[in-house]
Image: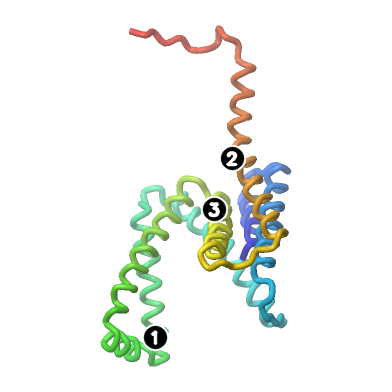
């Protein structure tokens, strides 16, 4: 999941959006840094890789990379669709699919029984639902106004910050390589954020003073 930046940029290029070699290099650095950070953060845990697991992970990575692009295509094709409408539609589809799955597997009655026996779980579900709704709204808003590539970068960065906060709160050990990868990632993000500002400043330096629009004070 940490390397989904590259598929997102490749899909964006296939859709016709131009990306420079610097953009690809930055995404490559971010993907490698996120992968190293995640690998080092999970050091010491037992893991087993199978062919089926690799296929499922590849399919998940592809679908996860395509999802923001599909949302971006939706907003571009139907400009009158609001972020709230898109969020409501996706949530409604998720509710219907989950209801069908729980009904088929006979887990719906068990869920209501659990809530009846543990009513305090309703508070946790309410807080989780509110947080999930706000997150989905921010995801749709970011995709509509900034594009799927920017959202993917934000999503990958959020994972690193989440692991870092977890390590601080629960006193987890983090290797020097993980800290180095994290510094490289945030440094790349800073460069990516400041690069357009430097470009605009350079363009302003090339403008002659008499070309500026003079605005009267009164």
On the question of residue 69 being in view, the answer is no
Distance (Cα) linking label 1 and label 2 = 44 Å
Residue 46: x and y, percent?
A: 68, 81
Q: Residues within 10 Å of mark 1 (few under 14, many from 20)?
A: some
Q: How far from the left and from the top, in percent, is residue 197? A: 58, 31
* N-term mark: 1 or 3: 1
Q: Helix, strand or loop at disc 1?
A: helix
Residue 40 is at least partly visible in this image: yes
Res. 193 mark: 2
Identified at 61% across, 52% down, the residue is: 12
- Residue at 68% across / 50% down in the picture? 184
Instruction: Identify the residue at horizontal 72%, vertical 59% (top origin).
Output: 177
Q: Are there few (<14), some (14-19), or many (20+) residues within 10 Å of tag 2?
A: few
Q: Which residue is mark 1?
A: 102
Query: Disc 3 on helix, strand or loop?
Result: helix
Is 191 located above or below residue 93 in the figure? above
Picture layout, residue 147 above or below residue 44? above
Image position, residue 203 (x, y; %):
62, 22
Q: Quadrant of residue 18?
A: top right
Q: Quadrant of the C terminus?
A: top left
Q: Considering only order in the chain, which callout, 2 or 3, is on the residue closer to the N terminus?
A: 3
Mark 1 or mark 2, whichever is nearer to me: 2
Q: Secondary structure at mark 2?
A: helix
Direction from residue 66 to residue 106 in the image, left or right: left
Residue assigned mark 3: 154
| Residue found 31% across the figure and 70% down from its top | 126
Could you say which is closer to the camera, residue 94 or residue 1? 1
Q: Where 6 sits versus 109, above or below?
A: above
Name the side, left or right, on which 34 lies relative to 67.
Answer: right
How far apart are labels 1 and 3 at the CA level?
32 Å
Q: Residues within 10 Å of mark 3 (few under 14, many from 20)?
A: some
Q: Position of residue 144 (x, y in %)?
A: 46, 49
């Amino acid at each position: 999941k940490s390397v989904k930046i590259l598929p997102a940029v490749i899909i964006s290029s296939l859709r016709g959006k131009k990306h420079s070699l610097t953009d690809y290099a930055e995404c490559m650095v971010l993907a490698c840094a996120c992968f190293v950070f995640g690998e080092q953060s999970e050091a010491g845990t037992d893991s087993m890789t199978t062919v089926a697991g690799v296929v499922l992970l590849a399919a998940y990575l592809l679908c996860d990379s395509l999802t923001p692009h599909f949302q971006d295509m939706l907003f571009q094709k139907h400009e009158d669709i609001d972020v709230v409408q898109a969020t409501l539609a996706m949530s409604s589809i998720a509710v219907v699919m989950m209801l069908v799955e729980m009904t088929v597997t006979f887990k719906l009655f068990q869920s209501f029984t659990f809530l009846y026996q543990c009513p305090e779980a309703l508070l946790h579900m309410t807080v989780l639902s509110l947080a999930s709704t706000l997150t989905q709204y921010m995801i749709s808003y970011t995709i509509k106004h900034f594009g799927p590539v920017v959202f993917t970068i934000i999503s990958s960065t959020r994972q690193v910050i989440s692991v870092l906060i977890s390590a601080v709160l629960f006193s987890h050990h983090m290797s020097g390589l993980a800290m180095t990868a994290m510094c490289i990632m945030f440094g790349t993000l800073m460069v990516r954020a400041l690069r357009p500002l430097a470009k605009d400043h350079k363009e302003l330096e090339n403008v002659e003073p008499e070309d500026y629009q003079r605005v009267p004070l009164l």
